[in-house]
Amino acid sequence: MIRFLCTCAVVILFLILFIPVLLIEWCIGKFNRRAKDISCLRIVQAAFRLCLFTAGVNVTLIGKENIPTDRPVLYVLNHRSFFDVLLVYVQMPDLTGFVAKSQLQKAPLLNIWMRNLYCLFLDRSSIKKGLQTILQAISHIKNGISICICPEGTRSDTDEMLPFKEGSFKIALKTGCPIVPIALNNTSAIFEDQFPRIKKTHVVMEIGKPIETAELTAEERKDIAQITQEQIRQMLRKNACLV
């Protein structure tokens, strides 16, 4: 319980103490949008690293060299824990927006940081709004901003992934950007497996080789969700013994 309280304290103190920083970032953005964007990215990554340290999360990282650094990509990961976003985001080399559930728009201060980082809020109850989110993500990719998605749609309660929703893959297919699959092993052991306690945990994260969507055949484009999920599944199985 101590780790849980300490981690919550880190989040709350960050959101409160960094209120003046939001104002400074706003001012910087008026003169240099790129400087503001990178500054926000690095600040949030530092906060996430502190949260992971406080929670006692030890990470074995495999394949970071597979992240393209010269173009935006679509990151795709399996989803078992609230900590998945933290684990992935600290590895992002450049601007990356997450597709998050729409309820987070109501989170005070957090929603401002998320908008500063180009995160998008997905309303799963509306097909029209969901399409609008996909179109926004496509626009971000075209403007050089990577997007990260959890295509299961929600956290899985078991080691078996939920089926990937195909709609989100249009972000890559419509822009021709690479898909970078990410496999996360053992993240539910941090928090979800013994809610509300957080325990010291070793997790394995592997970043797979990019799938070049521009080189896919028509049949592969049709099955891209299954192809990506299978690549993640293979990495999960391979790394299970490392946990």
Image: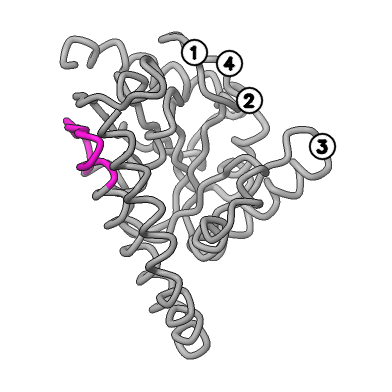
* Residue identified by numbered label 3: 126
Disc 1 marks which amino acid? Answer: Asp
Q: On screen, 175 above or below 26?
A: above
Nearer to the camera, 180 or 149 = 149
Please name the residue shown 43% across and 82% down the image: 24
Which type of secondary structure does the marked residue at label 4 adopt?
Answer: loop
Using the image, tell me which numbered label, if any, was put on residue 165.
Answer: 2
Disc 4 marks which amino acid? Answer: Pro
What distance separates the C-alpha of mark 2 from that of mark 1?
Answer: 17 Å
What distance separates the C-alpha of mark 4 from that of mark 2?
Answer: 6 Å
**How far across and how far down the image is residue 130, in percent?**
74, 41
Nearer to the camera, 220 or 75 = 75
Disc 3 marks which amino acid? Answer: Ser
Question: Contact (CB < 8 A) between labels 3 and 1?
Answer: no
Give the mark nearer the N terminus: 3 vs 1: 3
Which type of secondary structure does the marked residue at label 2 adopt?
Answer: loop
* Residue identified by numbered label 1: 157
Please name the residue shown 31% across and 19% down the image: 189
Q: Is residue 62 magenta?
A: yes
Using the image, tell me which numbered label, if any, was put on residue 163.
Answer: 4
